[in-house]
Amino acid sequence: MGPYGRSERRPSMAERRPSVSYTPPSIPHLAGLEKPQDPHLKLDHCDVLILGTGLVESILAASLSWAGVEVLHIDQNKYYGDLASTLTVEQIKKWVMEVNQGRINHFQEAQLYVPGGSQTNNFCSKDYGIDLTPKIMFAKSDLLALLVKSRVYRYLEFQSLSNFHVFENGQFNRKVSNTTKQDLFTDQRLSLTDKRYLMKFLKFALIDIQDEEKNKLIWDNAKTPIGEFLKHQFKLAEPQINELVYSIALCSKELTKAPEAMARIRRYLTSVDVYGPFPVMMLKFGGPGEISQGFCRSAAVAGTTYKLDTRLIDYDQDKMIARFSDGSSVKIKEKLIISPTQIPPFLRAQYENEVVKDLQEFYVTRLTAIIKRDCHQWTSDHETSAIVVFPPHSLPTDNNESVQVIIQNGGSGICPVGESIWYAQLIEQDLSRAKLDLQLALDKMQMTILKEEEEEEEIDEQPQQSSIDAAMDDVDYDDNLLKPTDMIMNSGVTPPSPQIVSSSFKLGDELNSFTPKKPLDFVCKLGYVQKTYIKPNLVNVLLNANESNNIIYKTLAKNPNVIFSNMPSAELSYDGVVSETKGLFSRVTGSDEDFFDVDFEDDEEFGDDDDDTPAHPNASIIGNGDLLSQVPPENAIESDDEDDDDKHHNDHHHHPFDVDQMEL
Amino acid sequence: MASPQKSMNSQTSRLALFKLVLLGESAVGKSSIVHRFVKNTFDDMRESTIGAAFLTQTVDVPEKEITVKFEIWDTAGQERYKSLVPMYYRGANAALCVYDITNEQLFERAKDWINELKKQAPEGIVICLVGNKLDLEQDRKVTQDQVTEYLESLDGSENIVLSAECSAKSGDGVLDIFNRIARALPLDQRIQEWAGGAAGTRSRSSTYSGRRTGGVDLGRGDRQLRLLLLSSCC
């Protein structure tokens, strides 16, 4: 047998299970001319039909295809990504209109503000890639491990993110920038005592985490807010608590309980130094939309058929025949998976009455702004992205929830160089309040970037009084707020007008005295509200997910073959995405045993490394519970589960800060 | 039959990575051409999982002391319903637009794909219009004159458009396509970029037009799969 002979491959689950007839995945890209792929061949059947090319659905399509399942994957849009898409400005315009016409389920109150006309606001729509549900990727996370294992990472470009800013007392603190041992621990502002307490806590968080006493302490405080826990158990001072909770853990001092917050703190700390001195990575050219495309391509390679701009218009449960808007029909042998934004009209009533009726809904409000400045002041050298967090009660609106903002400048490939996109989100359930919180957060950022920019410029040039006066006249703050009249699309539906209280601006001390010389120019601002049934702490995805609390496990009485997927969660990271996909995979195949159980051959680039391949450092992360899996069940805590989790954590544990060697 | 050009792993030669995409209707033999080029086999129906990413093959350009490494993206069938992912075109340096010389309709469709490329692909992409199935000369429907006429109609276009004919089945002409594309690529520009400070980097980003700011290499060819901050190797 030659070097390119048939290779040994472990039969997939579908092959091993006698109950399912196995159809070898066709690999069109290697098909020879003897058996050409007939372009006129009518696609008349498939095992699974998936509607919507969002992130979860795309990973599902790829995982099923590689397990030998025949998948037809369609999307009603002309583009990939569905609810997780990365869109151009023109596509956003259309999307906003469709949302306000009620045509995109689970999204509402979309507003788009494009200042000026084509003369004053010149931009090329295609230069922008706006994520509908932007996310950040921790270096140690199950999705990244899956990207590596599935080889989908090779379609993508990654960039590091190490700057987390917390807005406090009217200014951005940069304590968490460049989170290295030195930066975190040689902060001159820390007293020796505070430093010692912080060190003690970090040792607790990172070393011997399977230790019984440690875990007992955490679980004894299952109901204790993390702020209190850190204060009483570790005597941490307020600034360190804020830093740990808001930027490192991306959660809330009051609302997040100790076990979940500890898992989140560990998520960050264990991610630093996995691939470099940064905890988080961003994808170039867009986040979830880009990853969706990557998995769709992988699925296509494994045999999935793709059709965009196609709707399911009818499904006959008895004959298992699906009919599509292009006139074709296909027999669906097993399941239909339907994205929450692409539920066909004939299934909507069943979805409302049988699937989501008893589930608690959560609203995520988002405000995305494209700024004609890059925000290099907030990113590290050689980086293109940063995170800004406005903790609860830090804004003049006395916000209840954190406003989390992802900032990406032109180097990230989603906007031209010299510009940036700010993605702000929060989970405030009072939506008019949420919009105001977001607007004020954006305003703070706007003032801050202008101030920092002018400070840079004014090093050798003092401002003249007259120019400030002139600027006062020019600046019209209302211009920067979303107003109902800002809707550039007349959708026939009047969006609820956001409460805009422009007189209530209370800038922080630092910003109070600052008046910008010129306002910040925007390409556009986009606001919208998204509904999800995933809890903000992901407990109904990562732990105890079942038919009583999660959409994906629900079964329709009349259409038992239909499965619905979830809207993206409010979680800023990708946590939960892989778990949800595995849940769906299990519903189709019976278990998640074969979820990306594919031994990809190494091509010549990797060929020389064959000896080492089993030692793939990240592959083993797959299948692990997520980082947040330490969230306790709502009522009882199974000690067995804890042990498993902890062993598991221990297996892959490393000490990014070398805390055990650190002495003060 | 043409012999395949195996990677020469020339010690002195510098490696320049370029992305090449395939276009054309289903069943014109896109994959077969690549398979012939990369593996020098034709009817190998082996179930391969390599395709999870893409195939690679090198071409030496001795006169420039450079080895061109093609990262070849196949359509994976997504061309069938016009559902190619946008990332397919992104950063592409070269494209094969394939038709079947025995089918005039497929030739017309190849022209449509060239128009699509001009819309979607980066400026300066090198395009090669490839007539496959040269082994079926007796059934030829698309003449050289037609091709020449079409290429002339493209004069003034910003792209370099080459044309070629081959048989993936016999292997005739396949290697020649890639040799010609390699020489039409902006090799001098790449050499200058290297001279400009990025020498020695094998990063993918250097292939693409995008900026390298903050780029992270997730382990291309690096068995430890360690991410490298590009800033540290530039």
Image: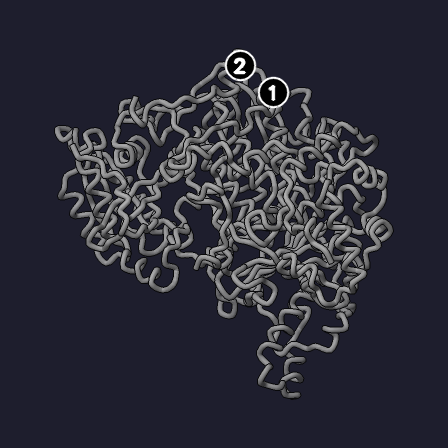
Residue at position x 67%, y 42% from top? A569
Q: Chain of mark 1?
A: A
- At label 2, counting other C-alpha atoms closer than 10 Å, the crowd grade (few under 14, some 14-19, many 20 or more) is few
- Spot occupied by residue B227 in the image (x, y as percentages of width and height): 51, 48
Q: Position of residue A476 (x, y in %)?
A: 66, 73
- In the image, residue A67 sits, relative to residue A246, either above or below, namely above
| Rendered view: B20 above or below A36 | below
Q: Amino acid at mark 1?
A: Gly
Looking at numbered disc 2 in the image, what kind of residue is underneath it? Arg
**Quarter-wise, where is residue A587 in the image?**
top right
A198 sits to left or right of A586? right
Residue B222 seen from this side:
yes
The chain letter under disc 2 is A
Using the rendered view, name the quadrant where residue B171 is placed: top left
Secondary element under disc 2, as helix, strand or loop, is loop
Q: Which residue is mark 1?
A: A590
Q: CA distance from mark 1 to mark 2?
A: 11 Å
Q: Is residue A630 above or below residue A238?
A: above
Would residue A499 appear left or right of A29 to someone viewing this image? Answer: right
Badge 1: residue crowd in 10 Å (few <14, some 14–19, many ≥20): few
**Which badge, 1 or 2, comes first in the chain's sequence?**
2
Q: Residue at the spot x=12%, y=28% of the render?
A: B138
How many circles with numbers are drawn on the protein? 2
Label 1 element class:
loop
Q: Position of residue B181 (x, y in %)?
A: 24, 48
Outermost residue on the top side: it is A18
Q: Quadrant of the C terminus of chain A?
A: bottom right
> As drawn, is B46 to the left or to the right of A227?
left
On the image, numbered disc 2 is attached to which residue? A17
